[in-house]
Amino acid sequence: MIILKGLNQLHGFPGPTAVAIGNFDGLHLGHQAILRLLVERAAASHLLSLVLTFSPHPEKILGGEKVLMIQTLAQRLAGLRRLGIEAVLVASFDRALSRMTSREFFEDILLSRLRAKEIIIGQDFRFGRNRQGNVEELRRLGADRDVGVHPVPPVQVGGKTVSSSLIRSLLEGGDVEEARRLLGRPYEIEGKVGPGSARGKSLGFPTANILTKNEITPPGVFVTEAVLGKEIFPSVTNIGFRPTFNQDFLQVEAFLFDFQRSIYGQRIRLRFLRKIRDEKKFATPELLVNQIRQDVEVAREYFENQGQRMRS
């Protein structure tokens, strides 16, 4: 997959493209519908499938809002590669880009630089200064230049419209199971295993302390899968402030079942499968240990049930 960063270095693709435009944060089921059509239209018309995405999120520039991203840029790019996308342009959404009119964006970016012959967008797509352009204007502009425009309707799951903002809200509330339904896969965070306080080890449950750049870390105690390279380990993950020990900083700790190796400095991914409980303060470390034992049993039962479903 070709990865280009920044519009300034791009003067034009050597061949025509089919382009999907969006933030694609999370690569949820709605995004996947857009990207499937992109790959199909590119193949049918012998075009390069290209995604135009943005970093930072436009709302951080336009509205000054604190938008917590579902994925890091690296996770987003890896997901696009898995979906069969051939090229990605990561544009820095800045004030200059935000001041372009919808026609300027179409002429300069989509036609001149990306050489778009097919454009795939969400049905509610807006573009140009003050979000003045919509799908109907894009269709008119495309018709004048023989460019196909293909809006994709939103995806509904259980009566809910799948969106990145809804998934962010679910994850911030710890509802990883509903987020999983809308993403089409478990939510993941990743990072390096760093040094911790070794308090888990002293309690009989040694944990991996994970230093992550993911902006959303769901609060609570979860059934998780820990991915190390090509190996997958059942695990329980606690995300919080360890109130029993009056800790004042957020920590991500994973207890991997039946695991003895030292993995300091290694990269690890956590897949969130089910929430067990909220984090809470215990009167004594012994009461905490009893609760951890119960959490581990809940997780073991979860994985046993999953295994039985796989075999049936």
Image: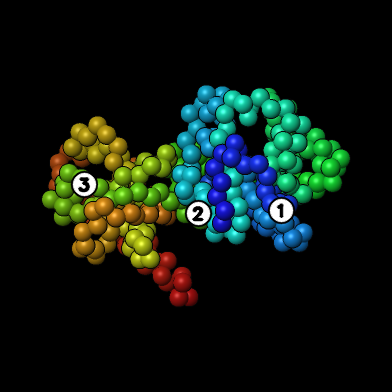
- In the visual, does 64 lie left or right of 49? left
Residue found 72% across the figure and 27% down from its top: 101
Quick check: 181 above or below 131? below
Question: Upstream in the sequence, badge 2 or badge 1?
Answer: 1
Number of numbered discs present? 3
Question: Upstream in the sequence, badge 3 or badge 1?
Answer: 1
Task: Say whether residue 188 is visible.
Answer: yes
Per the rendering, the mark at residue 46 is none
> How many C-alpha atoms fall within 10 Å of the one at disc 3: few (<14), some, or many (≥20)?
few
- The three-letter amino acid code for the residue at tag 3 is Pro
- The three-letter amino acid code for the residue at tag 1 is Gly
Q: CA distance from mark 2 to mark 1?
A: 24 Å
Residue found 68% across the figure and 56% down from its top: 48
In the depicted view, which residue is nearer to us: 141 or 179?
141
Per the rendering, the mark at residue 78 is 2
- In the visual, does 127 lie left or right of 206? right
Residue for badge 1: 15
Q: Quadrant of residue 143?
A: top right
Give the quadrant of the N terminus. bottom right
Measuring from the top left, give residue 74's x and y in whole percent. 46, 48
Nearest-to-viewer mark from 2 and 1 = 1
> How many C-alpha atoms fall within 10 Å of the one at disc 1: few (<14), some, or many (≥20)?
few
Residue found 68% across the figure and 44% down from its top: 12
Measuring from the top left, give residue 272's x and y in whole percent. 41, 52
Residue for badge 3: 195
Nearest-to-viewer mark from 3 and 1 = 1
